[in-house]
Amino acid sequence: MIVQAGSVESATLIKQAAEAGLSLEWIGETGWIQPEFIGTLGTEPLSSQEGIGYAAFSYNADSPAWEFFQPLWDDTPGYGDEFGPATDQYHFSTYDLMVQTALAVEYGGSYNASDWAPAMHAVGEAPGTVCYTYTECLELIRSGEEIDYEGVTGPGTYTDGGVNAVVQSYTPFNEDGTAGEPVILDAQRFLELLGEIAVEADCDENNQCDW
């Protein structure tokens, strides 16, 4: 059962289904990592259902980018000890987005979106010297080199429509309510499927579109 709803609403639905005697494989979205989901659901349905988890994206634990970010986040007072570990979906994804955006601003030369938005492709895609941290990549840009940023969520490449080729994953919940180990999916296959179901829009100069 694929559910696209808020954390509380999703948890309520699953809880009621479990109380009615159903046992299903539930797949939700990133918001299920919020404390409100398990807080509303409780742990009992986690053992009675075939599975409960969310489809999103994960981090590349083998990347030098993760080797830099993870201990820095977890060991800095006021970060990991107060807001949770580096493995939290919102922590590592926001970090990666901010690093690539900051590099694009540097490369594009201004804070104008018309300058830095196209530069997201330039700093995240080949050709260029592969780099993994903001400091390392910034030094390369300022020395006049092209870069290829590889972040904690994967390569910085995009489809023509702007979809990022991140580390696709499914994360199940353990019976105690904690998030389990992410199951890594084929990111390239994801992008191929996305292209097959994409809807084309024909837009005029006033941005009025027919789908």
Image (cartoon, rainbow, N blue to C red):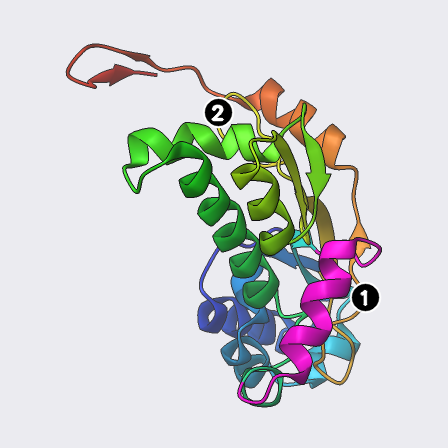
Residue annotated with mark 1: 181
The location of residue 170, given as percent across then percent down, is 73, 54
**Residues at badges 1 and 2 in contact (C-beta under 8 Å)?**
no
The location of residue 4, given as percent across then percent down, is 50, 53
Write down the region rendered in magenta. 59-78
Of tags 1 and 2, which is closer to the observer? 2
Q: Which mark is residue 161?
A: 2
Query: How far apart, in angstroms, are the residues tagged by discs 1 and 2?
Result: 30 Å
Quarter of the rendering containing residue 87:
bottom right
Compare residues 187 and 194 and report the one nearer the observer: 187
Secondary structure at badge 2 equals loop
Q: Could one spot residue 149 in this view of the protein?
A: yes
The location of residue 205, given as percent across then percent down, is 18, 11
The location of residue 186, given as percent across then percent down, is 79, 37
* Magenta highlight on residue 65: yes
Q: Identify the main secondary structure in magenta.
A: helix
Point out the image quarter for the C terminus. top left
Q: Could one spot residue 1 in this view of the protein?
A: no
